[in-house]
Image (cartoon, helix red, strand yellow):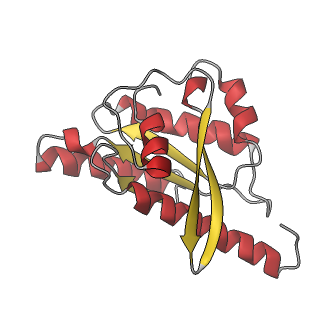
Amino acid sequence: HSGTGKTSFVRRWTKDEFKETYQATIVSEFGFKIHESKGNLYRIQLWDIGGQDKSPSMAKIFSRDSHGCVIISDSTDLKTLEDTLNWQKLVSDETNFIDGGKLPFVLVQNKVDLIESREEFEKIENETKNVCEMNNFEKYFMTSVKQSVNVEEAMSFLIDKIIERLEKHAEDGNII
């Protein structure tokens, strides 16, 4: 769904920058970052396929060969939380992890800095938690890309899950 902060998320994580406004992503963009985990360095590519809102078939092409997926929702628009399930299905139907299983998915509920009350935050968090648990997301994160809250945590969690699965796949005698 457009306007959830996908481009901002990619830029915050890869370049630690934030702009108040971005032009809508037309096709796809990506950023990369060297990520350290357990003493090893990994080059991580993070694709923003948000420009595919009107052309899901193109999103399938960009999600092939992925190792994990972050799906972003806007905490100020609960319709976008429902839309996360469509995106999860689209990517999940098209892409498997290298070990043949489903990709690890992380659900990000962005723009929590715009939530006005503790009660509203708890309501949105509970709805996000329910969607996460009922739809096989590994975990959810309440984030503010603007304030750099939980962006690194969400990505580190997903990358660690991916690394664990890749290591297990290699331990089983497979080439990665």
Query: In this rendering, would 52 be left or right of 153?
Result: right
Q: Residue at x 40, y 33 (%)?
A: 4
User: In terms of depth relative to the viewer, which is nearer, 136 or 162?
Assistant: 162
Q: Is residue 99 above or below residue 103?
A: below
Query: In this rendering, would 95 be left or right of 2?
Result: right
Q: Position of residue 13 (x, y in %)?
A: 46, 51
User: In terms of depth relative to the viewer, which is nearer, 58 or 18?
Assistant: 18
Query: In this rendering, would 68 be left or right of 136?
Result: right
Q: Residue at x 36, y 40 (%)?
A: 18
User: In terms of depth relative to the viewer, which is nearer, 44 or 125?
Assistant: 44
Number of on-image labels: 0
Q: Residue at x 59, y 18 (%)?
A: 54
Q: Is residue 16 above or below residue 24?
A: below
Q: Which quadrant of the view contains residue 102?
A: bottom right
Q: Residue at x 37, y 45 (%)?
A: 109
Q: Is residue 106 above or below residue 74?
A: below
Q: Position of residue 58 (x, y in %)?
A: 71, 26
Indicate the quadrant containing the C terminus: top left, top right, bottom left or bottom right. Answer: bottom right
Q: Position of residue 68 (x, y in %)?
A: 63, 54
User: In terms of depth relative to the viewer, which is nearer, 78 or 15?
Assistant: 15
